[in-house]
Image: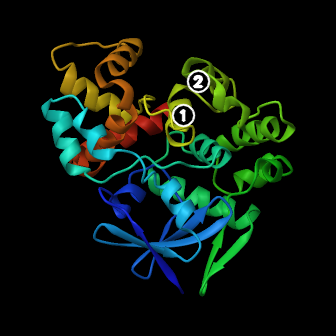
Amino acid sequence: MKLERIGAPNFDLELTLDSGQTFHWERYRGGFAGLIGDRAVYVEQQGSELRALAGSAREVQRYFALDHPLPDICAAFPDDPAMCAARDYCLGLRIIRQPLWECLASFITSSMKQVAHIRQMSRALRQRFGEQRVIDELELYSFPSAARIAQVTEKDLRECALGYRAKNLLGTARLVASGEADLEAWRVLSDDELRARLCSLPGVGAKVANCVMLFAYERLRAFPIDVWIERVLKERYFARKRKVTAQKLREFCDSYFGEHGGYAQQYLFHHARKTTPRRVKKRAAGKAARLSQ
């Protein structure tokens, strides 16, 4: 396997791929194998340099957003204990630029699920409906297109362990495949317009819409709020208030974290997910399960 070198200062490959943005990369040899769009890619890190499968440098640089001025972004974070702890823990984590449909579909299936479960569903969808790619002896599968998903039945999708999410994924796939939901054309919309369009799709609420805006449309101000982030915000920023509405949280995040709120959210999320005691994690998982019923 021939590799080419890519300069990657201020970047942590493993941290980024483990941060809950994307769900299909696999450990392979000394690095990771996955797909960027339909292209199979292998990438490993040695210090401030990546080594990627020959011919994939441009895709790797763009996908991992190596052009984002990460030191400047981190320097612009609010100077408070929670944010500083998350920043220090997550140094090198970057917001990935994901394909629009793949990101949207992945987060529709993510509703009320932990990362390990989302990875299982992603793998099942890819293996059953995607196209095979091979790196050495490793078999990889592309994420199935909206047109491909639109052709299958809800039963087919439920067999990939999607549960009630199958109906939502199928409905959205049919809208995208027909052109009624033109994800590419939506790139020019304002944040508010884009969020509204996304929320009009089956299975897409504010949290999923903000994830897609952040991880696919590169709207770095978008601030997804899930169970983890809601808990962090209430404990660290509203500890003296008994009740904080969802609207209050959204307004606070938009004004307090500013134009790079998406980065701040991802750092807070990953720090909380990795450092929270197991007992609290179980309570959070239990709350998510109850909400999904």
Residue of label 2: 195
Q: Earlier in the sequence, mark 2 or mark 1?
A: 2
Q: Nearer the viewer, residue 138 or 73?
A: 73
Work out whether 26 lies above or below 259: below
Give the label on residue 213, or none.
1
Specify the quadrant of the image occupied by residue 193. top right
Dot 2 crowding, Cα within 10 Å, few <14, some 14–19, many 20+:
many
Specify the quadrant of the image occupied by residue 134. bottom right
Work out whether 264 lies above or below 282: above
Residue 272 visible, this orientation = yes
Q: Amino acid at mark 1?
A: Met
From the top left corner, tell me how far across and down residue 186 is, in percent.
68, 30
On the rendered structure, is 183 left or right of 199?
right
Work out whether 97 lies above or below 72: below
Q: Are marks 2 and 1 in contact (CB under 8 Å)?
A: yes
Give the label on residue 107, or none.
none
SS at mark 2 in the image: helix
Q: Amino acid at mark 2?
A: Arg
